[in-house]
Structure formats: C-alpha cells, structure tokens
Amino acid sequence: MDSATIYWGVLFGSVGTGYAIYGKKQQKIVPTLCGVGLIVFPYLVEGTWPTLLVGVTLLAVPYFIRM
C-alpha cells in the first residue's frame, strides 16, 4: 500500500461519513448505503487506480439515483 492509496482512502472515508450522516438524517437509503460503502471499501480494495475508480463511482451514485 502506497501513500496515495492511504490519502485517497482517508478522503473517501471522510466524504462517506458525510454521506452517511446526511442519508440518515434525511431518511434516504441511497446516500446512506453509498456513505457506508465509501467508509468500508478502502479496506477491501488494493491499489491507487482501483481505489479511485470505486470511490468516484460511489460518490456519483447518489446524484444519479434519487430514492
């Protein structure tokens, strides 16, 4: 694991915390699940480019799926 992967994981985890709090307060399932996913996935994905790909995808999902 290199330092870029760690930095991206921290960034995505921080944004995921915001998504999870927002989704819980608004009682919306998509932002809540994406937030939890953003918090958990850096532990499961190895490498900088896969981290970026999964993170950006999870960041974009609530903008396209409104429930």
Image (spheres, helix red, strand yellow):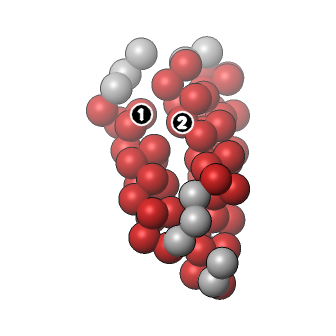
Q: Quadrant of residue 2?
A: bottom right
Percent position of residue 10, x then y: 68, 65
- Name the residue beneath numbered marker 2: 34
Give the label on residue 15, or none: none
Query: How many angstroms separate mark 1 from mark 2 (CA)?
Result: 7 Å
Percent position of residue 5, x then y: 59, 74
Q: Quadrant of residue 37?
A: top right
- Viewer-nearest of discs 1 and 2: 2
Q: Residue furthest bottom?
A: 3
Crowd band around label 1 with a 10 angstrom C-alpha radius: few (<14), some (14–19), many (20+): many
Percent position of residue 62, x then y: 41, 34
Residue at horizontal 67 percent and vertical 23 percent from the top: 24
Q: Amino acid at mark 2?
A: Cys
Whether tag 1 and tag 2 are in contact, CB under 8 A, the answer is yes
Q: Is residue 28 left or right of residue 7?
A: left
- Name the residue beneath numbered marker 1: 62
| Residue 66 visible (yes or no) | yes
- Pick the quarter of the image with the N terminus: bottom right
| Residue 14 visible (yes or no) | no
Residue at horizontal 58 percent and vertical 81 percent from the top: 4
Residue at horizontal 45 percent and vertical 53 percent from the top: 54
Q: Residue furthest left?
A: 64
Q: Is residue 39 above or below residue 67?
A: below
